[in-house]
Structure formats: structure tokens, C-alpha cells
Image (cartoon, rainbow, N blue to C red):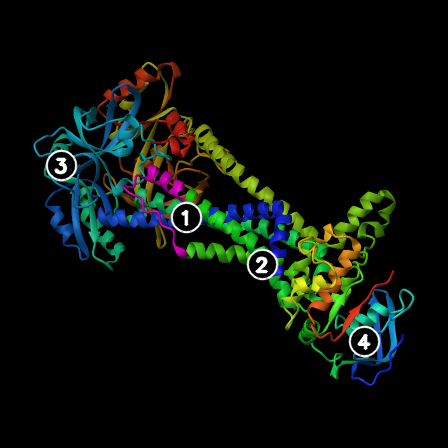
């Protein structure tokens, strides 16, 4: 984990964060007591072997999953105690995701894939503008199946940046 | 349109084959529902209007003969509003170019003007005119069957006398919405008709001058019908009253009521099956859809769509399919309902039909289908809504399987790999497997119901007309007579065998229950009228006691060995208690059976018969029919073959 020390505000803070998965007969310990702080304006790269818990940590930071124990806060708000509804709102207004496999909705065009996010966000960008930012202004009406892997990835990035005009936090995962 | 709604429509387009199939199943259920209920409502409204506007009486009574002066005493019964006395007579008819026996019912109407009750709705021509004693108005069904129009003539044998009648009008009556000859099980408009004739000429022809043999009355609102019936029976007793009855026992009214009951059943049974299948199919489709869209659902959740939004999204998809099915079903139901109502109108001879589609029927159709769909898809939608996004983001873990019960019992080595896969798959999701079995069962049920009904009718016909009633024709006499009629009939060329019977109208009473029917006197070891038990074995009637049809036994709540009170409504009207000695199974008709000599003794009469069953030489039926028509003592003749034939003709072709 690399951290760019800055004097600006702490965005994420975790304390003794653990995550266990119960896989039937087997129990998998994905995170063991993670302590970290992430600051505003910081670019953080998380590296690790497969199965080391990168996705798990990002899922918890992004409000997609909840920790088994420990604490995680976003701008001082305790995410570990948030209800399902609060987590949904958190994801809707503060988090942008670029998924490992993009998770584009195959029945929607590039523009609509971005609109799915902007339609429920506060003060979002225009979907077309977000796509222009990633150089896809000519592919607005293409369905995912008509786009290359790289183009699909760019749609996923446009989708993540479109909802937040003043970027608060973008969690992204891409492991190959 | 939101992007999510765009997804919905495109998903639907992708599923269009399955969606249309499910919508069609829903449409079938809803169409049956709307068809049955709208037809029922239409018939109920039409019936009520027809009864009201054309004055269907509240109480009906037949008797042997009473002087006209009795009318004022009937009028004086408290609660009685309108009274009409009539002469009603069975008649044998001769229709030119039609050799089969034709019988009819002649009903008197005032010599001029409309009857007070059972008013006629004229379809063609006019009512009879005073002073023309050969004029008749005939029922529309009969007229249509023979293409009669005003001006045509018919020959009739009334009370042994021949008369030529001129048709002046064709009409409908609320009393004969369902027109069926006594003893028949299905209407035969070619061989049975209703004729209305002026009171004076009919009374003259029937030796009923200054007298009547039928009376109908209406009651003021809130009158106790049973009390009036008791008083009327008391009044008519000395005049050979055959027992009065209210609307619920009137033939036409009763048939309609039965028909309404069947429609109501149809409105429940078929939609339940169809909607059950639809719910199951929706469950399969939605479960599969949610499973294939796991990652999309996860993404949507990651973007901030809540559980409710996800649930609504999938519910919308289901509702679109259901609403499409319901709209199609309602439209189909209205179309079928109108067709069915039209068919009923033909069969029942309503003068008009008010097709009625009540808003609550449509509302119920909507609620029931959406309800069924929601129940069917509840689990799948819930699963979608509650899907944890982080978990859904990962590819679905391999499903958990275990060795099946059969395998753990040591039978594993007998199973090939594919068999193991099948067995484990079935056992892994027992509920799903059960639902699949249920779905297939419902599908089979739909197929079976249709075939079963036809088979049931065929079986009923076979038992009734081949095993029990083995005669070719039944001749009924004007009055109970001696055995000489049998000898006369047997001497006709073409008659192979004859067997007498006695039929006595009676009211059966047991405890507080009673039933108006007849006691049939049957000869010992009868060849032509065999009584059968539920296994179709012949039941012999003991020399004493009475045998009842099992249905009548249930109706009266009587057991073998108990005493049944039989109140005879003919002759010296004896009232006696007779032990019930057994039950027989009979699919058509409700009556009691006694040994013929025992019935004669019961009636304090000699060797008297009401009619004769005949078997005929198939090559010589026509001369037999012609000869029997000429016999003055014969009231009517029913040919079994004709009953059978009518029964197998589709309803729509009856008119």
C-alpha cells in the first residue's frame, strides 16, 4: 500500500478492520486488522497477490460489503454502523465504481449505461459529457457487445466519474 | 423514459417468446373467468327482467279438474296477488312430412288479449282472435325447428279428438325458457313444442268447460311461499291437486339455476388452473432472469439503487406480462362471453339479452392475476432485492450438492453419472421439483377435465339408455287404464315386446324434508326398465316397500329400514308410510320405485297401468308411430333413440 502523505482531510479511516467469509464448512479470513488513512486528493494504488483481500477492502470502503469487526469511516461518518439504507445512499451520492469486469448492462447503450448512474445522482454530469471525457463521444448509442474491451472499460470509467462532479472518491479495481 | 425502464423493455423483448406464452396462459384463465361471470351476470339480469316484465308466477299448481268458482277462494288466500286459472293439456301433433312422434303442451290463454301471467312475447304474427277456435300461438323454438310461420297448420289429437290448428303467432314465454318435454333429459325442439290456444276452444276440446286444471299465482312481496302452497294444496285437494310448488321447483327456473351454478363453478375452476400454471411459469422465468442478471443487479446496487428500486424494477417486468395477459384475457372473455350468452339465448329462448360486464369482474380479474403472479414470483424478486452487492459481484459459487438419499443407501453403484446428476439435482431443490410436478399435474388436469366430462356423459348415457332403460319407446296414457292397452299395442305389427308400468305423482316426506316426484310401479323381473346399483348390477324390488334413487335418499336424509311417508296426489290420494328397502343408482331422474302389484294395492286399485314400454322392429317403426298416434287413450310417446340423438347434437345446432 502506498500513501501520499498530505495535510488535507482524511477521507477514509479504518481501525482493526477484519472480514471473515463463511463458505459453508470453510471459514476464510480475508482481512486481518487493517489500519489505514486515505486523504483527499491522494492517489492510492493497492497491490497484492490474488486472494490477499484487495477487493474485500475496496468493497468495504465502497459500502458494498460490511466488515466483520473493526471500524471504517468516511469523512467522519461511521460506515460500520450504517444501515442498509444509509449504505445505499452513501454509494449513490459519494462512491463511483469501476468494476473488474466492468459490469455494463448489456441491454443498455453506452449513454444509457452512464445515465443509469446519473439519473439517481445529485448534480451529475451529462452522460454524453462523461463519455466525451473518455473519448467515446462517437460511441454513445453502441451497446456493450458492439464495443471493444477497452471501450467497455472506458464506459465503466465514465459511469464512475459522471455522478460526482467534484470527485470525492473513486474506488476502482482492475487486476490482471 | 429512465435508463432502467429502457432495460426493462429490452429485457422483455429478449424474453418475448416466454413472455407471450405466459401472457397467453394468463389470458386463457382470465378469459374463462370473464366469460363465465359476464355470461352469468348477463343471464341473471336478462332472466330477472324477463320474469318481471312478463309476469312469471310465484306459485304453480296442476290438478285434475276444478270449477272456475274455486278461483275466488284461491284469490282469498292471504298474500296472493294475481291468479290465473288455465287448461293445460298434453297433445299429440302431426307435422306434415315429419314421421317421428311429436308431442306438445297446449296451454290456454284468454280468448282475447294477453294472459295475466306468463305473458307472451310475440316474435311473429299475433295473439289469437276471439271466435276463431282453431287458432294457436306456438313457441319459437318449435316453430324454428319446423320452419313454421303464421298461417301454417298442424294436426293435433286433443283428448282423443283430431283437430286442425292454424298458427297465428310465434312467441316466447318466461314459463318455458327451457323447453323440455316431461321425462326427457335434453330439449328436443323438433319433437316437443308449446302451443297456446284460446281458453274456450281448449276447454271445450278437453271437456273442461267452466273448469280448469292448472293455476298460477303471484304473491305480494314478503309473503311466505310455503304457507300459500299449503293453503293452496288444501284447497285443491278435493279437485285432484297434484301438489303446488314455488319457482324453485319450476322446471325451466330450476334448469336455469343449475346452469348458473355450473357457470359459477367454471368461473372458479379453470382460472385457478390457468393462473396456477402462469404463476409457476413466471416463477421459473423470473428466477432464471434474476440468476442471469446477478452481476447487473450488483452493479445497480453499487450505483446506489436500493432494494425497493430493484424489486420494483423486476415487479414492473412481471406486471407488464400480467397486464398484457389480463387485457388480452378480458378482451377474449368479453368476446367469448357474448358468444356464450348468444348460445344461451338460443337455448333458453330469451326475447332479448342484455350483455353485462360488471366493473368488479374486470377489477377481480386484475387483482387475481396480479396476486397470482406476485405469489409466484415473490421469492425470485425478494432474492434480487436482497442480493448482497459484493457477493453478486463475484461469479456465482458452484452450487452445493450432496449425495442423494438413494445413493447413501448403497445404491450408488447402480446409478450412471448422468442419473446421479439428475437425482442430485432433483433432491437439491425439493420445493422446485415439487412445483414442477405440480405444474405438470395442473397441465394434465386441464387435459383431463375436458376429456373426463365427455367420458362421464358417455358413461351416463350408456348406463341410463342401454343398461337401465332398454325400451325403444315409451307410451303414456291419458288416464290410468287396464292391461287391454298393452294387448292392443302388442298386436301392432312392428311391436316386439311390451311391458307395463304405473306412475303415480306423489310427495315424499321424511322428517322435515319433502320432495315432489312420482312413484314408479315396475313389473317383477322387468326386462325393459332395469334398476341398477352403483356397480350396474340389477336390483330386484321386493314385493313390499319402496326403493329410492340414491340422490333422493340423500336429499331426504333417509336410510334403508326407515319409514317414508308417501302422499299420493292422484285418485283417492292415500297417505301411507312405506319402508325404504334399498337405493338404486340412477344418473337421470329422481323417483321412488315399487313392485307394480304392491303399488296397485297401495292405491286401492285393480290391475291398472299408466303406460307401456315397447321394443320395436327397427324396420317398421313408422307404421307403429302412426298407429299409436291414432289411439285415443295415448297421451304421448317418447322414442328413446330420439332422446339419445338430441343429446349428442352440439348445443349450437339445436335450434
Q: Which residue position holds label 2?
A: B316
Q: Which residue position holds label 4?
A: A68
Q: Is mark 1 on a helix, strand or loop?
A: helix
Q: Do labels 3 and 1 share a chain?
A: yes
CA neighbours of label 2 inside 10 A, class few (<14), some (14 to 19), many (20+): some
Q: Mark 4 lies on which chain?
A: A
Q: Which residue position holds label 3?
A: B199
Give the image location of residue B68, x and y in percent. Answer: 11, 43
Q: Do labels 3 and 4 share a chain?
A: no
* Res B416 visible: yes
Is B439 located above or below residue B502 in the figure?
Answer: below
Pointers 3 and 2 in contact (C-beta within 8 Å): no
Camera-side residue of B364 and B350 = B364
**Mark 3 or mark 2, which is nearer to you?**
2
Q: Give the Cα separation between the discs numbered 3 and 2.
A: 70 Å
Camera-side residue of B272 and B631 = B272
**Residue B600 is covered by the magenta coloring:** no
Amino acid at each position: 500500500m502506498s500513501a501520499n502523505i498530505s495535510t488535507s482531510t482524511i477521507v477514509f479511516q479504518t481501525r482493526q478492520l477484519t472480514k471473515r467469509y463463511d463458505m459453508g464448512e470453510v471459514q476464510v479470513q480475508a482481512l486481518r486488522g487493517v489500519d489505514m488513512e486515505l486523504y483527499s486528493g491522494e492517489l492510492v494504488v493497492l497491490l497484492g497477490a490474488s486472494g490477499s483481500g484487495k477487493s474485500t477492502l475496496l468493497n468495504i470502503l465502497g459500502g458494498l460489503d460490511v466488515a466483520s469487526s473493526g471500524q471504517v469511516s468516511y469523512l467522519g461518518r461511521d460506515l460500520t454502523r450504517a444501515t442498509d439504507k444509509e449504505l445505499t445512499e452513501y454509494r449513490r451520492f459519494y462512491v463511483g465504481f469501476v468494476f473488474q469486469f466492468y459490469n455494463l448492462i448489456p441491454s443498455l447503450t453506452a449513454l444509457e449505461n452512464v445515465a443509469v448512474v446519473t439519473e439517481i445522482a445529485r448534480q451529475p454530469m451529462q452522460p454524453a459529457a462523461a463519455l466525451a471525457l473518455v473519448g467515446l463521444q462517437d460511441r454513445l448509442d453502441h451497446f456493450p457487445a458492439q464495443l471493444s474491451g477497452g471501450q467497455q472499460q472506458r464506459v465503466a470509467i465514465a459511469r464512475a466519474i459522471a455522478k460526482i462532479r467534484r470527485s470525492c472518491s473513486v474506488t476502482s479495481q482492475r487486476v490482471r | 423514459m429512465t435508463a432502467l425502464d429502457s432495460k426493462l423493455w429490452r429485457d422483455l423483448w429478449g424474453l418475448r417468446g416466454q413472455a407471450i406464452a405466459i401472457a397467453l396462459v394468463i389470458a386463457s384463465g382470465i378469459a374463462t373467468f370473464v366469460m363465465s361471470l359476464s355470461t352469468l351476470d348477463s343471464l341473471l339480469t336478462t332472466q330477472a327482467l324477463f320474469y318481471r316484465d312478463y309476469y312469471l308466477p310465484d306459485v304453480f299448481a296442476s290438478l285434475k279438474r276444478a270449477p272456475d268458482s274455486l278461483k275466488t277462494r284461491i284469490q282469498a288466500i292471504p298474500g296472493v296477488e294475481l291468479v290465473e286459472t288455465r287448461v293445460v293439456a298434453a297433445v299429440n301433433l302431426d307435422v306434415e312430412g315429419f314421421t317421428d312422434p311429436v308431442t306438445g303442451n297446449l296451454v290456454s290463454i284468454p280468448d282475447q288479449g294477453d294472459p295475466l301471467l306468463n305473458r307472451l312475447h310475440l316474435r311473429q304474427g299475433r295473439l289469437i282472435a276471439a271466435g276463431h277456435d282453431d287458432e294457436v300461438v306456438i313457441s319459437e323454438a318449435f316453430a324454428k325447428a319446423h320452419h313454421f310461420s303464421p298461417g301454417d297448420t298442424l294436426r293435433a289429437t286433443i283428448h282423443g279428438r283430431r283437430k286442425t290448428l292454424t298458427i297465428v303467432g310465434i312467441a316466447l314465454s318466461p314459463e318455458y325458457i327451457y323447453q323440455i318435454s316431461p321425462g326427457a333429459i335434453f330439449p328436443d325442439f323438433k319433437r316437443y313444442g308449446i302451443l297456446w290456444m284460446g281458453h274456450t276452444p281448449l276447454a271445450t276440446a278437453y271437456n273442461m268447460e267452466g273448469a280448469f286444471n292448472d293455476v298460477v299465482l303471484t304473491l305480494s312481496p314478503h309473503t311466505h311461499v310455503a304457507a300459500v302452497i299449503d293453503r293452496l294444496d288444501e284447497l285443491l285437494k278435493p279437485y285432484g291437486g297434484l301438489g303446488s310448488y314455488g319457482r324453485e321447483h319450476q322446471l325451466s327456473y330450476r334448469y336455469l339455476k343449475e346452469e348458473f351454478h355450473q357457470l359459477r363453478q367454471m368461473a372458479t375452476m379453470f382460472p385457478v388452473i390457468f393462473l396456477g400454471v402462469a404463476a409457476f411459469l413466471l416463477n421459473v422465468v423470473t428466477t432464471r432472469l434474476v440468476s442471469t442478471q446477478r452481476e447487473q443487479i450488483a452493479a445497480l446496487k453499487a450505483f446506489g439503487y436500493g432494494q425497493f428500486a430493484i424489486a420494483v424494477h423486476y415487479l414492473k417486468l412481471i406486471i407488464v406480462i400480467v397486464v398484457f395477459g389480463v387485457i388480452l384475457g378480458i378482451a377474449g372473455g368479453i368476446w367469448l362471453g357474448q358468444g356464450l350468452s348468444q348460445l344461451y339465448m338460443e337455448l333458453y329462448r330469451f326475447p332479448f339479452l342484455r350483455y353485462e360486464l360488471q366493473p368488479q369482474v374486470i377489477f377481480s380479474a386484475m387483482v387475481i392475476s396480479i396476486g397470482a403472479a406476485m405469489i409466484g414470483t415473490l421469492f425470485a424478486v425478494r432474492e434480487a432485492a436482497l442480493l448482497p452487492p459484493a457477493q453478486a459481484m463475484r461469479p456465482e459459487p458452484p452450487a452445493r450438492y450432496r449425495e442423494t438419499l438413494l445413493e447413501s443407501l448403497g445404491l450408488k453403484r447402480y446409478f450412471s453419472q448422468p442419473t446421479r446428476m439428475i437425482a442430485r439435482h432433483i433432491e437439491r431443490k425439493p420445493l422446485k421439483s415439487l412445483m414442477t410436478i405440480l405444474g405438470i399435474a395442473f397441465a394434465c388436469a386441464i387435459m383431463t377435465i375436458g376429456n373426463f366430462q365427455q367420458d362421464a356423459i358417455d358413461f351416463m348415457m350408456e348406463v341410463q339408455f342401454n343398461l337401465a332403460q332398454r325400451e325403444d319407446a315409451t307410451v303414456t296414457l291419458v288416464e290410468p287404464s287396464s292391461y287391454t292397452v298393452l294387448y292392443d299395442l302388442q298386436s301392432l305389427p312392428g311391436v316386439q315386446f311390451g311391458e307395463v308400468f304405473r306412475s303415480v305423482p306423489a310427495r315424499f316426506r321424511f322428517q322435515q324434508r319433502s320432495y315432489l316426484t312420482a312413484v314408479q310401479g315396475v313389473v317383477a323381473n322387468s326386462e325393459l326398465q332395469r334398476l341398477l346399483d352403483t356397480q350396474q348390477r340389477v336390483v330386484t324390488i321386493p314385493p313390499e316397500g319402496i326403493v329410492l334413487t340414491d340422490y333422493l335418499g340423500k336429499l331426504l336424509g333417509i336410510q334403508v329400514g326407515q319409514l317414508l311417508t308417501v302422499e299420493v296426489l292422484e285418485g283417492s290420494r292415500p297417505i301411507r308410510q312405506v319402508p325404504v328397502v334399498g337405493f338404486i343408482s340412477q344418473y337421470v331422474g329422481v323417483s321412488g320405485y315399487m313392485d307394480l302389484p304392491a303399488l296397485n294395492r297401495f292405491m286401492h286399485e285393480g290391475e291398472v297401468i299408466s303406460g307401456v314400454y315397447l321394443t320395436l322392429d327397427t324396420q317398421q317403426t313408422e307404421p307403429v308411430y302412426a298407429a299409436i298416434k291414432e289411439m285415443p287413450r295415448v297421451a304421448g310417446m317418447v322414442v328413446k333413440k330420439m332422446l339419445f340423438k338430441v343429446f349428442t347434437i352440439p348445443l349450437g345446432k339445436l335450434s
